[in-house]
Image (cartoon, grey):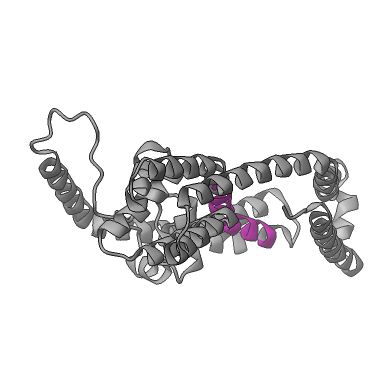
Amino acid sequence: MLAALLVFVVVSALVAGAGVYAMRLPEIMANRRMARRLDEVSKRGEADDDQPQASFIREKKAGPLPALDKAFSGANSSLGRLIEQSGVVVAPSTIILASMMLALVCSIVALALFKQPFAWPLAAVAGAMMPWLWLRHRRSARMKRFEEQFPEALDLLSRAIRAGHAFQTAMGMCADELPAPVGAEFKRSFDQQNFGLPLKDTLHELTERVPILDVKFFVTAVLIQRETGGNLAEILDNLAHVVRERFKILRQVRVHTAHGRFTGYVLMALPAALGIVLSFINPEHMDLLFRERMGQMMILGAIVMQTIGYVWIRKVIKIEV
C-alpha cells in the first residue's frame, strides 16, 4: 500500500513538473532570443577582437518555481548563500525539488530491496540530503582553491601598487590575470566599485562571499591602511608570506593527524558495513535486531554513540593554525 502511494506521488510530481515546464517554455524561449540579441549587439564592431567580452548583467539561473527562488535567494538565505559560495549556477527551487525527488526515489528503492521498517525513512533522509551535501562539497573545494590562489593575488596586488597603480586598478588586474575562483571574486568586487559601491562595502561583500580567515585579514589590513596610511604593498607582501607559512604548517598537521582521521573513518564505517554484510549472510538473525524493542533501542544507542565518537575524534585531531 505504501509503495503504491509513493509511486502515485512520484508520478504526480513528474506530471506537475512537466506541466510547469510547458507553461514556462515560451518565457524561456523568449529569454534565450533576447540573450542572443544582446550578445549580437555587444559583439557588434568587435569582430577583430579575439578576447571574449564579459557581460555587465549578473545572470541568475531560472528555476522551475520562481516563488521559491525569490524566497531562498540573496544573502539572507542560507541556501542562497550556499549556492553562491559553491559557484554552482543553479536555482534554489531546483535544489529543493531535487531533494524531494531523491527522497522519494531512495525510499522506493529501500522498500524494494529491504523489508525493514526503518529502511525507507533513513533512505528518504539520505536522499534528501544528497543535493545539500553536494553543494557543501563544491563550496569546500572552491574555498580550498581560493585559499591556494590567494597568495598569488596578494603578490599581484603588491606588484601593481608598487608600479604606481591604484588599489582599484590593481584589483581589476587580478580579475583579468588570475583564474577562477580568485579572478571571478575580484572581478565582481571590481565591477561593484565601477558601479558606484564604496570600497568598504565592496570588501565587506567579499568577506561574506568568501568566508575565509585570510580574506578577513586582507580586508582589515586594507581598510586600516586607508584610514591611517602606510605602505600597503609591504603589508600585502607580509600577509602573503604569513598565508604561505600557515599552509606549510597545515600540511604538516594533516600528516601528523592522518592516523587519527583514518581511525575515525574506519570506526564510523565498520558497524554499518558489518550490519549490511550480515543482512545478506543471515537475514533471519538480523531481523531480530530490527523487530524487537531491545534491538531498536540498541540501534538508536549505536547511532548516538557513533556520532559522539566521530565528533570527539574530530575535536581531538583538529588543530587551529
**x then y, percent, for residue 221:** 51, 59
On screen, residue 3 versus residue 223, left or right, reads: right
- Please give the name of the residue rendered at 12% of the width and 41% of the height, measured from the top-left corner: 40
The residue nearer to you, when weighing 151 against 72, is 151
On screen, residue 198 versus residue 262, left or right, reads: left
Residue furthest out toward the left: 45
- Please give the name of the residue rendered at 63% of the width and 47% of the height, measured from the top-left corner: 242
On screen, residue 308 versus residue 108, left or right, reads: right
**x then y, percent, for residue 16:** 37, 61
Count of numbered tags: 0
**x then y, percent, for residue 35:** 18, 48
- Please give the name of the residue rendered at 55% of the width and 61% of the height, measured from the top-left corner: 6
294 in the magenta segment: no
**Residue 95 visible in image:** no
On screen, residue 296 versus residue 197, left or right, reads: right
Q: Is the magenta stretch mostly helix, strand or loop?
A: helix
**Residue 212 visible in image:** yes
**Quarter of the image with the N terminus in it:** bottom right
The residue nearer to you, when weighing 7 against 275, is 275
139 in the magenta segment: yes
Q: Quadrant of residue 226?
A: bottom left
Q: Magenta segment, which residues?
A: 121-142
The residue nearer to you, when weighing 152 against 9, is 152
- Please give the name of the residue rendered at 30% of the width and 59% of the height, measured from the top-left corner: 193
**x then y, percent, for residue 259:** 85, 41
